[in-house]
Image: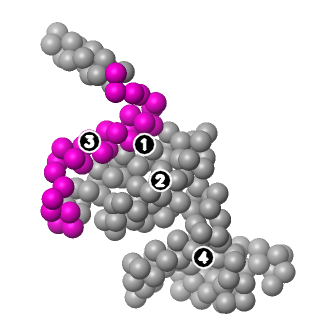
Amino acid sequence: MASDEVQKTLDKANMLIAAGEYKKSFNLLKKLNKSDPDVAYAWFGMAEASMGIPKLTLQEVASYYQKACDLDPENPLFFSTYGNFCFENGILKKGEECFIKASEIDEQNSSMYLSDLATSYYFSANNFRNHYPNITDDEILQTSLKYILSAFNIDKDKANKLISGIQEITKE
C-alpha cells in the first residue's frame, strides 16, 4: 500500500476511534496490517481501538502495543501508552520498563515520564495488591519514591537534606 493510502487509512481509523467506533477502526487497521505488517501506527491503533472491544484478551492487546514498540523503538508515545495500559491492568514490571524506555528516548521530557511512572506504580501496586501478595507497603513507597526522586534529579544526599528540612518545618 502506498504511503498516502496508509496515512489516509490511519487518519480514518483515528477518526473512527474518536467517534467511538472501535470495532470499525480495529477492523480497518487489521486489514492494513495484513497488507503492510510493518506500519507501527497501525498496530498502535489496533491496541487503542481494542479498549472498546471487550472480547479481546489482555495478551492480545499487549501484543499489539508490543508490536508497535518493536517496529518503532524510538517512539516514546508508544512506550508510555503501553506502560499506562500495563499499570491499568496490574502488570507492574512491564509498566516500569515501558516508562523507563520512554524517559530514555525522550530525555527532554524524562521527568514527566518518571513522575507518571512513580504515581502509576503506586496506584497500580495498591489496586492490584492481590496479584502481588509479597509486596509490602514500604516496597511500594520506596519504588515510587525512587522514580519521583529520579524525575527531579534528586540524589540520596539531597533527598535526606530535604527531608531534614521538612522535619524542621513541621516541628515549629
- Residue at position x 69%, y 77% in the image: 38
Whole-angstrom CA distance, mark 3 to mark 4, is 35 Å
Q: Main secondary structure of the magenta part?
A: helix
> Which residues, given as a range, are shown in magenta?
130-157
Q: Earlier in the sequence, mark 1 or mark 4?
A: 4
Whole-angstrom CA distance, mark 1 to mark 4, is 27 Å
Q: Earlier in the sequence, mark 1 or mark 2?
A: 2
- Residue position marked by numbered label 4 in the rendering: 43
The amino acid beneath tag 2 is Phe
Mark 2, secondary structure of its residue: helix
Please, is residue 159 above or below residue 35 in the view?
above
Mark 3, secondary structure of its residue: helix
- Which circle marks residue 99 in the picture? 2
Q: Earlier in the sequence, mark 3 or mark 2?
A: 2
The amino acid beneath tag 1 is Ser
Give residue 160's quadrant in the image. Answer: top left
Eye-nearest disc, 1 or 3: 3
- The structure's colour scheme is one colour
Number of marks in the rendered image:
4
* Residue 112: x %, y % from top left: 50, 42
- Residue position marked by numbered label 1 in the rendering: 115
Q: Earlier in the sequence, mark 3 or mark 4?
A: 4
- Residue position marked by numbered label 3 in the rendering: 142
Q: Earlier in the sequence, mark 4 or mark 2?
A: 4
Q: Going by the image, does 163 lie left or right of 24?
A: left
Give residue 5's quadrant in the image. Answer: bottom right
The amino acid beneath tag 3 is Gln
